[in-house]
Amino acid sequence: MHLGSPPTPLTPNPPNPQPPTPNPQPLRGGDKQVLKDFAKPICQQLLNIADKKRANLFAWRGQFSPQLVEAIMSAYCLPNSVILDPFLGSGTVLLEAGNLSLEAYGFELNPAAWMLSKTYEFINQGSRDYLLKQLRENLELEFPFRILTSWETLVLDWEQKVKQIRDRLDPDAEILLNALIILLDVGNNPITNEFIQSKFFQLAKLIENLPYSEKKIAAHLGDARVLPLPDNQIDFILTSPPYINVFNYHQNYRQSAECLGWDLLKIAKSEIGNNRANRGNRFYTVVQYCLDMAETLRELARVCRSEARVIFVVGWESQVMGVPFYNADIIERLATESGMYKKVLRQKREFKNKFGKRIREDLLNFSNCDIVREGTEQLAREVAAEVLKMGRTFVPLKNREYLESAIERVPAISSTPKLDRNCCLYQTIN
């Protein structure tokens, strides 16, 4: 049984028009003499988060650190900027924008991440008590806390009960319910009344502690290559794009998202950097990545104002069949050689992941040149061919034929299919 209903194109529950158009106005930020210096490096200790004081509100693999986002925005984001994160993940940029009372929009391809990030729209609601109370009362009705019953007693009909709750909720409270189902992480946790209640308690505390801002905060399901935003509206982009051979993010909270009706395998076909479609020859993913990121850069140039500040935080190196590829180098070439962006600064940061491995990321500061190029595909194919040929130095003998095949097929390989939201849902079972 599936708990969700197919949403209308581009906008989640509740149904509403496509993302609001930010009010056009001259370049924001005030006198250029008092602007934050976009070419000035951030202190390395801040970039590396040597003193970790904050954690992400949601568990999501590969997400931004809130301290990193805070450091970048404090250093480079101008007053009254309209912010965009086209690879939103679980929404850290929206939260930090809310803390700074800045208008912000985010787009995310992954339904689980989007449903979590959607909760940050409650930053625009001063009083959230009514919605939390509505969901709490319904949960207590269907999943009462059982004092004399073992916590191990599973709720076998929990999906049907959730559907009944959904039918009684206001649209905004339904956003909370969706996030709760994701946080249950179905398949990895036993679903009991007590577990559901404990997860709701955690979610309610998070919502209650969100900052309040009158400046619009919006999270939308969408593809970074086709944004439903008007031209020349964004002042500041901060994002961490996918990298080559990326982790399969659709596995995060997969069963929870599927319980809500999402067909994640269909959606995964639109994930940039994902090698699922190229299992026969994973080097094809390098070509697709160049094509996809060129399209993304072109779309971002379209929605940005002249001289808008664009910051990419990029995983430095990816390995494909024993060959290193450098994501930041690829993005820098596509951005600057297209003429759409001017590179202002490049920085690096290092940190240890939870497995103790040292990770490097590059920060690319670009300024939008107010030029939207039509011929980015040819540049992307040229860059792809060059980086593949550089791989000849490193490729193991057993994989050489795959590399040569990819080089030969550069002109023929297509970009990753763009997200078609309307065909990504299962049919709802009533």
Image (cartoon, rainbow, N blue to C red):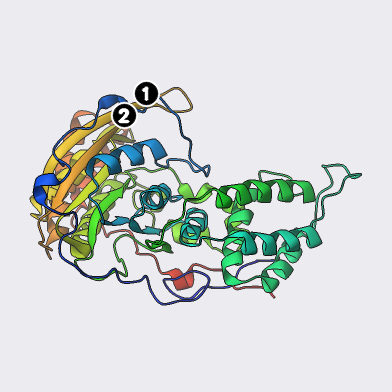
Across the whole image, how many numbered discs are drawn on residues?
A: 2
Residue at left offset 39%, top offset 41%:
64
Residue at left offset 25%, top offset 35%:
362
Q: Can residue 186 be spotted in the picture?
A: no
Q: Which mark is residue 46?
A: 2
Query: Residue 193 appears at what percent x and percent y?
Result: 78, 51
Q: Is residue 156 left or right of residue 93?
A: right
* Towards the viewer: 254 or 266: 254
Residue 268 vertical placement versus 233 (above, below) = above
Q: Give the quadrant of residue 190.
A: top right
User: Crowdedness of circle 1 by 10 Å Cα count: few (<14), some, many (20+)?
Assistant: few
Query: Residue 399 appears at what percent x and percent y?
Result: 30, 35
The single residue placed furthest to the right in the displayed view is 148
Residue 356 vertical placement versus 100 (above, below) = above
* Label 2 close to label 1 by CB (< 8 Å): yes
Q: Which mark is residue 50?
A: 1
Residue type at numbered disc 1: Ala
Q: Can residue 322 be spotted in the picture?
A: yes
Residue at left offset 41%, top offset 24%:
357
* Towards the viewer: 290 or 361: 361
Quick one: SS at disc 1? loop
Quick one: SS at disc 2? helix
Query: Residue 35 appears at what percent x and percent y?
Result: 15, 46
Q: Is residue 310 left or right of residue 165?
A: left
Q: Is residue 61 left or right of residue 182?
A: left
Spatial separation of the CA atoms under disc 2 and disc 1: 7 Å
Query: Residue 301 appears at what percent x and percent y?
Result: 18, 60
